[in-house]
Image (cartoon, rainbow, N blue to C red):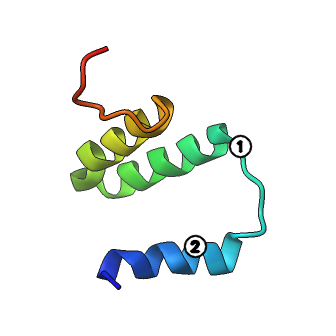
Amino acid sequence: MYFTDRGLEELAERRGEEQVTLAWLADQLQAFVDQHPDFEVPVERLATWLARGGADPDDEE
């Protein structure tokens, strides 16, 4: 298991039964970037990837 997997596992264990909206997720990601601006690029890449249904953000449409 990679170090980053532990955070994903904790998320699933602690909040896995909850239902959230994509608007809520976007708000949470924005709050995270506001507190941790060094992560803006990877969070934006993740958000773009999610918005495009798993397509690579660097691929041109």
Q: Quadrant of residue 4?
A: bottom left
In this orientation, which residue lies closer to the viewer: 31 or 55?
A: 55
- Give the CA distance from mark 1 to mark 2: 16 Å
Residue 32 spot, x, y in % from top left: 43, 55
Dot 1, how many residues are within 10 Å of its Cα: few (below 14), some (14-19), or many (20+)?
Answer: few
Question: Mark 2 or mark 1, which is nearer the start of the sequence?
Answer: 2
Q: Is residue 9 above or below residue 50?
A: below
The residue under the point 35% across, 47% down is: 43
Dot 2, how many residues are within 10 Å of its Cα: few (below 14), some (14-19), or many (20+)?
Answer: few
Residue 46 spot, x, y in % from top left: 38, 45
The residue under the point 27% across, 53% down is: 39
Residue 21 - label: 1
Location of the C terminus by quadrant is: top left
The residue under the point 28% across, 46% down is: 40
Q: Is residue 7 above or below residue 61?
A: below
**Where does label 2 land, which residue?**
11
- Name the outermost residue toward the top: 61
Residue 35 spot, x, y in % from top left: 37, 57
Residue type for callout 1:
Thr
Q: Give the left or right position of residue 15, taking residue 38 as reference.
A: right
In this orientation, which residue lies closer to the viewer: 26 or 2?
A: 2
Q: Give the left or right position of residue 24, taking residue 36 as reference.
A: right
Location of the N terminus by quadrant is: bottom left
